[in-house]
Image (cartoon, rainbow, N blue to C red):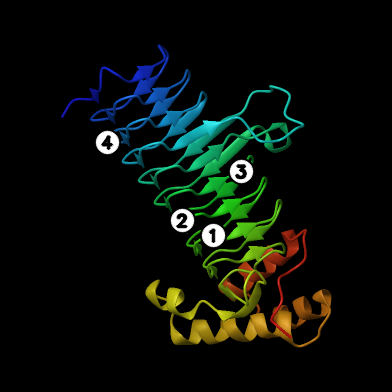
Amino acid sequence: MSTTIDPRAIIAKNVTLGENVTVGPFAIIEENVSIGSDTKIGASAYIGSDTTIGQGCQIYNHASVGTLAQDLKYAGEACSLTIGDRTMIREFCTINKGTEANRGRTIIGSDCALLAYCHVGHDCIIGNHFIASNGLALAGHVRVGDHVICGGNVSVHQFTQIGSHAFIGANKYVTMDVVPFALVAGDTLSAFIYGINSVGLKRRGFTAEERRTIKSAITILLRKGHTRDAAVALLQERWPHEAHVETLLSFIEKSTRGLLQFKK
């Protein structure tokens, strides 16, 4: 099939469209945009300049993708947004480009799904297979690993990191780094670690032994009263070269906001 552009759409001259792209009525695509093959741009969607969208994506009606950073320090420097393949952006989502603080980049991976009214702030780096329910709000500079799921109306503080395979329940306000594999829940807005994301790990093929190891490692790290250095030493001694423990250790090393804890 050939590319289909509704005559009511507004497209800048230097836009690159792959094969079988569909652009709906009243969509606006600004300059220096690249859209991969088999991607669909819905009615009244807005694609800002310097945005790259991969193959097989769906940008739904009234989504606003690649807009300037909501950062008072932004001074017009070059900035961009990159979205991977097969990612779905639902109605009324807003995604900002980066700022000079992150080399001007906001990045969203492949096979992600951002449901209606989600917001991704400037300089966010999001991995693959990320699922965000309605109303998610990521502040600037948030980093999200692969296979993370966030429930509806989750808010994440700027510069927070969420590790791979974590699950965050609905209506939570997350202000500290969430270790990989964690299950985050809580009362009202309060967020705490309640264990590991066992259901998600089972679905992704983690064995029972792997899940037990991850649970034990997170318990030592967050629940036994050790200092961070002491916990790291214990993990290294007990599970040398264990891949999932090394994932935890690598995340801890990069944490800047402190680690979200179990509820006391």
Image position, residue 181 (x, y; %): 56, 72
Q: Earlier in the sequence, mark 1 or mark 3?
A: 3
Image position, residue 123 (x, y; %): 64, 41
Element at label 4: loop
Looking at the rendered structure, which numbered label has been put on residue 38? 4
Classify residue 190 as left or right of residue 148: right
Q: Which residue is mark 3?
A: 121
Q: Earlier in the sequence, mark 2 or mark 1?
A: 2
Q: Which residue is mark 2?
A: 134
* Mark 4 neighbour class, 10 Å CA radius: few under 14, some 14 to 19, many 20 or more: many
Q: Earlier in the sequence, mark 3 or mark 2?
A: 3
Q: Quadrant of residue 55?
A: top left
Residue found at x 61% / y 45%: 124
Q: CA distance from mark 3 to mark 2?
A: 15 Å
Of the two numbered discs 1 and 3 in the rendering, the one whose residue sits closer to the viewer:
1
Residue type for callout 3: Gly
Residue found at x 25% / y 22%: 6
Q: Earlier in the sequence, mark 2 or mark 4?
A: 4
Please identify the quadrant where the N terminus is shown.
top left
Residue type for callout 4: Asp
Residue type for callout 2: Asn
Q: Which residue is mark 1?
A: 153
Image position, residue 72 (x, y; %): 75, 32
Q: Nearer the viewer, residue 202 or 157?
A: 157
